[in-house]
Amino acid sequence: MTKAYLTPVPVIVATTSIDDTTFEIQATPELQAYVLDFMCGDIYNKNLAAGWWDQADNPLVVPTKLMLIVSEIAEAMEGHRKSLKDDKLPDEDMLGVELADVLIRVFDLCGFLGIDVGTLLLKKAAFNANRADHKPENRAATNGKKY
């Protein structure tokens, strides 16, 4: 089932686990960038502690990590093509689980490299919003980006 997200949700409603106090946080672009960057650092630090970065000085570590991202995308494609359930989380579709693995690997690599992916994502999305080749009529045109 496809979900349509036409506009961003401007407010996040949260409840504390201490006293069930409900509060609202404005989901500004800065907060969105911060959350993504926090996730990158958190995932990287957990993977570092787990020993996944024991060869960080190897000049092939970045290419290797990039290809591991590609392998997760290939697994997501296989799950989609065959409509499979995930083998480790059997209540979940393999496509979604493998896409989560993609994000984990991307965030891990960004954390290692110190890439401010949250800010870059917002900048790239703003840039893409104004690109002529991203307009529906241009995508559908001859030699456009139509699938």
Image (tube, rainbow, N blue to C red):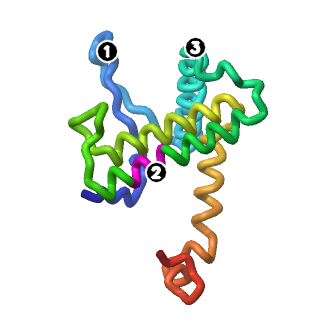
Using the numbered discs, state the Cα–Cα distance from disc 2 to disc 1 in whole angstroms: 39 Å
Mark with earlier residue (2, 3): 3
78 to 32, vertically: above or below: below
Which residue is depicted at the point 28% across and 33% down? 89
Mark with earlier residue (3, 1): 1
Q: Dot 3 lies on which element? A: helix
Which residue is labeled 2 in the image? 74
Q: Amino acid at mark 3?
A: Ala
Mark with earlier residue (2, 1): 1
Which residue is depicted at the point 51% across and 45% down? 71
Please report the bounds of the magenta region as a residue range.
Answer: 72-77
Which residue is labeled 1 in the image? 17
Judge by depth and name the residue closer to the eye, 136 or 71: 71
Mark linked to residue 49: 3
Q: Nearer the viewer, mark 2 or mark 1?
A: 2
Q: Quadrant of residue 126?
A: bottom right
| Relative image position of residue 39 (x, y in whole percent) | 53, 30
Using the numbered discs, state the Cα–Cα distance from disc 3 to disc 1 in whole angstroms: 27 Å
Question: What main secondary structure does the magenta stretch of the protein show?
Answer: helix
Neighbor class of circle 3 (other Cα within 10 Å; few <14, some 14-19, many 20+) is: few
| Relative image position of residue 3 (x, y in whole percent) | 30, 56
Residue 76 magenta-drawn? yes
Q: Amino acid at mark 2?
A: Ala
